[in-house]
DNA sequence: GCGCATTCCTTGGCCGACCAAGTTAATCTC
DNA sequence: GAGATTAACTTGGTCGGCCAAGGAATGCGC
């Protein structure tokens, strides 16, 4: 395989000499590539974030908190669009790590207010830098036109995947396609 | 914020009227989109696979087993390029679910031979169909040229992400770029 | 005011995925 | 052939994710 250190992250051997797709995946070559890219991208992000004391996935929560200031947890959940339980547990860990502070909402005793700690705000710059590094690494060798085209195509794919395949078969899809 | 349905799977509201990126992500817009697409794609795949009794991630293992027949577990691990422990646990569950059979390798008492059960082979067709559906859904509205371009760009991204950012700074990168 | 539905969050369970260690068996070295 | 190395899993732990259920506070209907 690679001249890799032997650690797991290498992924799918070199794509250059990638063997033919598995039989069951022949009808979905792009999906296959998306899956691989997704994993590699997450691993790459995780590697950069690890040095900052964050686990992959936590970035998005922190990013929102840095931007929005103190928010109700339910708003945060809507913003990052994760399962409430996922956010709860992640926040418990982020709090314990000192990246986040939580306090009850005085106006609604069910709710919890969340905010990034001052200490964590130092991370903002580093996360931004790491995120930029990741972008450079990801898009290396693509010129501006190609990057724009990739962004456009991915945005379209995102739109497609946002609309349920079964529900709202036509109407919602068409609505989502207005761009 | 958005006119989202509020259901969990919707993800990041409509990308069409996507608010500006978080501050910390401004230098990585494509990376942001990749992350979102990745999650949506995995969710979509998971939904299709769930009906077949598979969890997301297991498809890749099964695909390889269907193609390759009985293989040593170590070869399977290399093929799907996952952590050995991940594969071990996944196989234990797949075995208990009746999708996979495992037996010791007579030639090497350390090794384990794995193969798809006859029962699971019925799944092959359905997985292939689901995978095709996923592809259609993912690429809806893209013409053949756009699909090819997307595939090309993603392949390049995959290549980029395969080469370590720190190690082998130039040589391996250049080697990987031969395509 | 009372009851019922909603909203908000938490807990527990399960899976994929990783790392770190550890065990057993093969292999290489001398 | 004994000893060290390497290869092939396992186990245990941790995280991000999901679903399902549950408890607590709020809001609504009447």
Image: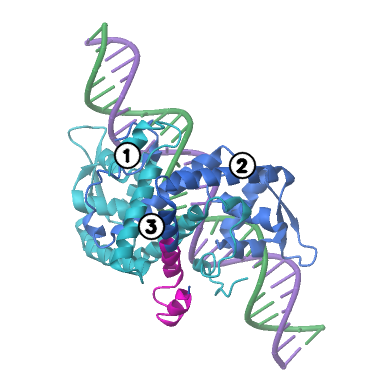
Chain colours: A blue, B cyan, C green, D purple
What is the chain identity of the residue bearing mark 1?
A: B
User: Considering depth in this image, is A5 or B25 the residue closer to the camera?
Assistant: B25
Q: Which range is magenta?
A: A153-178
* Residue contact at pointers 3 and 2, CB within 8 angstroms: no
Q: Is mark 3 on a helix, strand or loop?
A: loop
Q: Is residue B66 left or right of residue A108?
A: left
On whether residue B150 falls in the magenta region, the answer is no
Marked residue chain, label 3: B
The answer to which image quadrant residue B147 occupies is bottom left
Looking at the image, tell me whether mark 1 or mark 3 is earlier in sequence order.
Answer: 3
Name which residue lies at 54% across and 51% down: A57
Residue A61 visible in the current orientation: yes
Q: Which residue bears the numbered disc 2?
A: A126
Q: Is residue B80 above or below residue A154?
A: above
Pointer 1 residue: B176
Does residue A16 appear left or right of residue B153 in this picture?
left
Q: Is mark 1 on a helix, strand or loop?
A: helix
Q: Position of residue A69 (x, y in %)?
A: 72, 56
Q: How far apart are marks 1 and 3 (CA)?
A: 29 Å
């Amino acid at each position: 395989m690679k001249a890799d250190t032997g650690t797991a992250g290498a992924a799918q051997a070199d794509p250059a000499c990638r063997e033919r797709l598995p039989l069951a995946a022949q009808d979905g070559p792009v999906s296959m590539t998306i899956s691989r890219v997704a994993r590699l991208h997450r691993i790459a992000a995780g590697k950069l974030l690890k040095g900052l004391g964050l686990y992959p996935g936590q970035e998005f929560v922190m990013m929102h908190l840095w931007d929005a200031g103190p928010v109700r947890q339910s708003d945060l959940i809507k913003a990052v669009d994760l399962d409430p339980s996922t956010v709860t547990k992640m926040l418990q860990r982020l709090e314990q790590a000192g990246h986040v502070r939580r306090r009850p909402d005085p106006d609604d005793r069910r709710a919890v207010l969340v905010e990034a700690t001052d200490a964590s705000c130092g991370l903002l710059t580093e996360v931004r830098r790491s995120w930029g590094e990741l972008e450079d690494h990801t898009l290396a060798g693509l010129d501006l036109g190609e990057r724009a085209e990739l962004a456009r195509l991915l945005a379209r794919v995102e739109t497609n995947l946002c609309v349920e395949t079964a529900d709202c078969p036509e109407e919602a899809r068409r609505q989502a396609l207005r761009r």
